[in-house]
Image (cartoon, grey):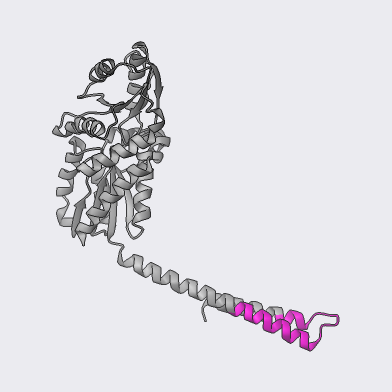
Amino acid sequence: MKKTGMVLWAAVMTAVWGLSGCGGSVGTGNLEKETVVLSEAVVNEVTEKEKQETDDEKRKAEQGSESDMVILAVSFGTSFNDNRENTIGAVEKAIAKEYPEYEVRRAFTSQMIIDILKKRDGLAIDNVTEALDRAVADGFRRLVVQPTHLMNGLEYEDMVATLEEYDEYFDTIVVGEPLLTSDEDFKAVVKAITMDTKDYDNGETAIVYMGHGTEAESNQIYGKMQETLMQAGFENYYIGTVEAEPTLEDVRKALKEKGGYKKVVLVPLMVVAGDHANNDMAGDEEDSWKTIFAADGYEVECLLQGLGELEAIQQIYVDHVRIAVNKQK
């Protein structure tokens, strides 16, 4: 009998001895009845505990056989703590829920953000190289890398280049696609953001999404997002970027040409509502998008939420992980 059973059996015997030693009018028949009832309860408890221990051992054995598998969720990162967990953290949790047999780990591609978090908050987050070194040291052999990047821009390309240096250390390395890759992805993201902001789409309000923009060829995704929105009939939605095209001026021009708008709602087209969203979009400085649109005569409302907060967006990442995992089989 296991230690748990022995302890519980001792408890039975103690109870029996206690009953037999009590004063008063407790007879032998009552004592036997009490002993039988107590014994049955303990036996049942022992059986349940042993069953639970067996199930736990079986589950641990199953997990042990899968212990060579890890999913590395790679994000640009953000120094905004609350938003980080509501976006990047939410995506990671959605992946972990779908794939409990994998360990899900985090890495950031922005060393600047990693350094800020370590110095300011004492929070240590691996960059991609550190995360890969740690995975190798911990004995993982099958690696799935899921970027939370919007597109396959410069950060994504650097990540892929780093992964190529680790081919010999893993049996398999597969990389999931960024958020906006296939035509289906664009349609799914359009559906997600328009459902989230549908209450603003009243014909008098322009819903403007601010993206980051990149020098890479992948910057074309912003134009494709605008095209997908228009094809789906969402004529009051506009896409602009901070550092590329379409520019803020392009968006302002489009709003004036359309005419009839009284209000502008600004939303980040970014996984995380970080520095750009809080400052370039919603800041009080004279060159922020909020200030400029207000100067144009519009009522302005800013929604400081990253795409990663939306369950529909999280599901797209989970779907991309599923495709990557299937490539390992």
Q: In this view of the protein, which residue sits in the foreground, 78 or 121? A: 78
Q: Identify the residue shown where x is 18% and y is 35%.
A: 154
Q: Is 263 situated left or right of 2 in this image? A: left
Is 18 covered by the magenta stretch? yes
Q: Identify the residue shown where x is 35% and y is 55%.
A: 98
Q: Which residues are magenta?
A: 16-43
Compared to 186, does 146 lie above or below?
below
Q: In this view of the protein, which residue sits in the foreground, 295 or 148? A: 295
Q: Is 183 situated left or right of 91 in this image? A: left
> Where is residue 133 drawn, in percent x and y?
24, 50
Compared to 269, does 89 lie above or below?
below
User: Picture quarter containing residue 183?
Assistant: top left
> Where is residue 75 drawn, in percent x and y?
29, 40
Is 241 covered by the magenta stretch? no
> Where is residue 312 drawn, in percent x and y?
35, 43
Count numbered badges in the picture.
Answer: 0
User: Picture quarter containing residue 180?
Assistant: top left
Q: Identify the residue shown where x is 37% and y is 28%.
A: 201
The overriding secondary structure of the stretch rendered in magenta is helix
User: Picture quarter containing residue 118?
Assistant: top left
Q: Would you say residue 134 is visible in this rendering?
A: no
Q: In this view of the protein, which residue sits in the foreground, 245 or 32? A: 245
> Where is residue 69 drawn, in percent x and y?
28, 59
